[in-house]
Amino acid sequence: MNGYYSVFNPRGEKIADCGSERDAINLLGMRNRRWEGHYYQFNPLPGDIIDVNQQKQLGTNAIIFADGYSVQEMIEVNGKYIPIPQLPQNCQEPFIPDFHD
């Protein structure tokens, strides 16, 4: 995991967080020549790691009706079977952070 770069002024106050070292150095260079700021790399801890490829599913009380042509998921409400509405398929492209940079 790449870290972030925190830029500080001479009094030790944080003035910016940069995503790359180049940006942190450029920010320091944009100040006047007497300005003695500094930066350091910050590597965040990953925290809780979640396995998104896990194949577990929650239980359901839905009933699946299948004829020879289609499968429809239904749920029983007050003795009647009601089809569960399905969301339309998403046709947007996925966002890949490093793809366009």
Image: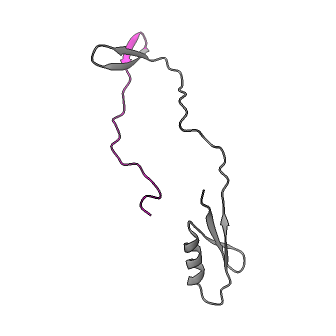
Residue at 67%, 77% (x, y): give it. Answer: 38
Please give left or right for residue 52 compared with residue 9 in the image.
Answer: left
Q: Main secondary structure of the magenta part?
A: loop
Q: Which residue is nearer to you in this view: 73 or 3?
A: 3
Query: Which region is colored magenta?
Result: 77-101
Q: Position of residue 32 (x, y in %)?
A: 60, 88
Furthest-right residue in this view: 11
Q: Quadrant of residue 14?
A: bottom right
Q: Position of residue 45 (x, y in %)?
A: 67, 53
Q: Which residue is nearer to you in this view: 97 or 61?
A: 97
Furthest-left residue in this view: 69
Magenta segment includes 41:
no
Q: Position of residue 27 (x, y in %)?
A: 57, 78
Furthest-top residue in this view: 79
Residue at 36%, 14% (x, y): give it. Answer: 65
Q: Is residue 6 above or below residue 83?
A: below
Q: Is residue 78 above or below residue 98?
A: above
Q: Is residue 14 above or below residue 78?
A: below
Residue at 62%, 61% (x, y): give it. Answer: 3
Please give left or right for residue 74 compared with residue 32 in the image.
Answer: left
Q: Which residue is nearer to you in this view: 88 or 47?
A: 47
Q: Position of residue 96 (x, y in %)?
A: 44, 53
Say which quadrant the N terminus sits in: bottom right
Say which quadrant the C terminus sits in: bottom left
Say how the picture is coloured: one colour
Please give left or right for residue 85 compared with residue 10 in the image.
Answer: left
Magenta segment includes 94:
yes
Q: How many marks?
A: 0
